[in-house]
Image: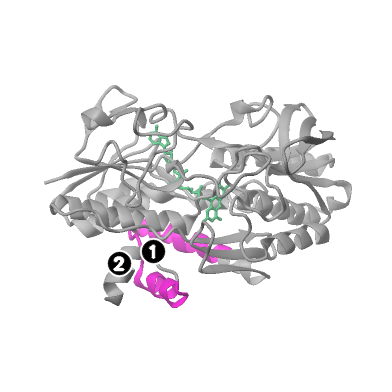
């Protein structure tokens, strides 16, 4: 019997546990260590921040579904990973020992890297449901006392789609509240151009998003480095493409939401051989750590280099489908190791992303996520809003019933020509 542990029960960790249970069968032990016993659907946080969803609507209780699938949950959280000793030290001093580990801890939010940034400073966040609920209170204040708004993503951020999404969702919510005419909006981003998205653009995201920004009266500043945030004032250096100072901006705001840079969580950061200098987990093409060969990683915690040089640091996003692809490869590879064989499955790193604008949206498929690509497609329209609602319902249902991938989902994705695994595709084709 093998003991497999998953550290983190977010988008990647929960489906990791389900896929492991599916592929390993009942004879092996699966334990999940998480901060708390609830799953929270992060992509719905922009809606929480304007009151279109409440906490209950986007959360799932993991206790009954994990019990049903014979997955042990340690909800006290990890204090420190000790990969050389094959154990996770929990916050109550006890430990979970494992034979194989999958790290799925998501991001640590590096607000502290910019003075005044984040919910403890002067800007809002939508990265966590608690932050989104705080942002909702600030949104209510904005509706009562309209003023300038700044939305964007800080230097080093790797998550741009949700920043655009939130700008347009907020625009719609302010229009519904009939105060949009008193709210000048500016989008501040580290990207070298609108629609870069950390991916050097996908299809024509540059034109699509610029056009949407113009139609929604959102001004923008690219190559932006946020120097400092004070109450009601943001100091921003706009750089040229070769990194020289172009303009210094002092932007007043009544409401601001800025996505921070990400780094690895403290429980794993700074472990020699496991993480890169930002604390992201090093992984080979099989999602396996090169030093600790029984440690795998999936999701935002995985180290992926940027797609190219930019004036201001811009990271690569790790979106839902890409994370699912990492999960499927990892489950397959751990099963092979347990059987005494070598890992052979590789994630395809496809990005399938829906950015909702409240009454429309932009969708893109980058296959693979890092150029050059076989599929480089983007489109916009009302259907994207409906599709995003479908994605939320689909995913939360999947989590609540304990299934990693209902059959029809697989069918739909394969019909689109989008596959989760390189290796399995090759086997099927052979
Ligand atoms: P998370 O979902 O963040 O999960 C990490 C888990 O690890 C959490 O449960 C956390 O509590 C736990 N953890 C952390 N530290 C510890 C510890 N010490 N001990 C125990 N547990 C720990 N992608 C899309 O494809 N579509 C979208 O529409 C989309 N929207 C997004 C919107 C926002 C606002 C953001 C921030 C991201 C969005 N993404 C989207 C990107 C990505 O899909 C999500 O960030 C996703 O939640 C990442 O999954 P993850 O499993 O890597 O991390």
User: What x and y, as percent, mark residue 179?
Assistant: 84, 50
337 sits to left or right of 259: left
**Disc 1, SS:** loop
250 sits to left or right of 159: right
211 sits to left or right of 166: right
Q: Nearer the viewer, residue 303 or 96?
A: 303
Residue wearing tag 2: 424
User: What x and y, as percent, mark residue 331?
Assistant: 28, 54
Quarter the C terminus occupies: bottom left
Do the residues bearing badges 1 and 2 touch, measured as CB atoms within 8 Å? yes
Q: Is residue 358 magenta?
A: no
Residue at 77%, 26% (x, y): give it: 231
Chief SS of the magenta region: helix
Which mark is on residue 420?
Answer: 1
Q: Which residues are magenta?
A: 388-417
Q: Residue furthest top?
A: 93
Q: Residues within 10 Å of mark 1 (few under 14, many from 20)?
A: many
Q: Is residue 11 above or below residue 419?
A: above
User: Taking the image as drawn, is residue 399 in sight?
Assistant: no
Q: Residues within 10 Å of mark 2 (few under 14, many from 20)?
A: some
User: Taking the image as drawn, is residue 33 in sight?
Assistant: yes
Q: Nearer the viewer, residue 278 or 364?
A: 278
């Amino acid at each position: 019997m093998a003991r497999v542990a998953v550290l983190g029960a977010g988008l990647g960790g929960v489906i990791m546990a389900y896929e492991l249970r599916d592929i390993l069968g009942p004879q092996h032990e699966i334990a999940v260590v998480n901060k708390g016993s609830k799953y929270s659907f992060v992509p719905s946080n922009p809606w929480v921040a304007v009151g279109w969803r409440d906490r209950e609507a986007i959360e799932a209780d993991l206790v009954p579904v994990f019990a049903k699938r014979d997955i042990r949950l340690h909800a006290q959280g990890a204090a420190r990973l000790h990969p050389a000793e094959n154990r996770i030290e929990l916050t109550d001093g006890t430990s979970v020992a494992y034979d194989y580990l999958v790290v799925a801890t998501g991001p640590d939010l590096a607000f502290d890297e910019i003075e005044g940034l984040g919910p403890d400073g002067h800007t809002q966040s939508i990265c966590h449901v608690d932050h989104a609920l705080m942002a909702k209170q600030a949104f209510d204040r904005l509706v009562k006392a309209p003023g300038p708004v700044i939305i964007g993503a800080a230097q080093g951020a790797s998550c741009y789609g949700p920043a655009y999404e939130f700008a347009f969702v907020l625009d719609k919510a302010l229009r519904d509240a009939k105060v949009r005419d008193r709210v000048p909006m500016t989008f501040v981003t580290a990207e070298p151009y609108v629609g870069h998205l950390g991916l050097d653009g996908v299809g024509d995201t540059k034109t699509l998003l610029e056009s949407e920004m113009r139609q929604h009266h959102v001004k923008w500043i690219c190559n932006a480095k946020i120097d400092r945030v004070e109450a009601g004032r943001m100091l921003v250096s706009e750089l040229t493409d070769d990194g020289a100072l172009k303009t210094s901006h002092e932007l007043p705001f009544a409401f601001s939401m800025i996505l921070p840079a990400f780094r690895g969580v403290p429980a794993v950061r700074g472990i020699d051989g496991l993480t890169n200098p930002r604390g992201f987990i090093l992984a080979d093409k099989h999602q396996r750590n090169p030093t600790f060969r029984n440690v795998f990683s999936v999701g935002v915690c995985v180290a992926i280099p940027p797609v190219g040089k930019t004036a201001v640091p811009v990271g690569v996003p790790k979106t839902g489908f890409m994370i699912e692809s990492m999960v499927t490869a990892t489950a397959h590879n751990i099963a092979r190791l347990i059987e005494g064989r070598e890992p052979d499955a590789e994630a395809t790193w496809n990005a399938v992303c829906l950015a909702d604008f409240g009454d429309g949206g932009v969708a893109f498929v980058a296959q693979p996520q890092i150029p050059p690509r076989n599929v480089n497609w983007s489109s916009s329209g009302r259907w994207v809003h409906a599709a995003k609602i479908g994605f939320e319902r689909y995913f939360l249902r999947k989590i609540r019933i304990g299934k990693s991938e209902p059959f029809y989902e697989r069918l739909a994705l394969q019909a689109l020509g989008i596959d989760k695994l390189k290796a399995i595709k090759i086997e099927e084709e052979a």
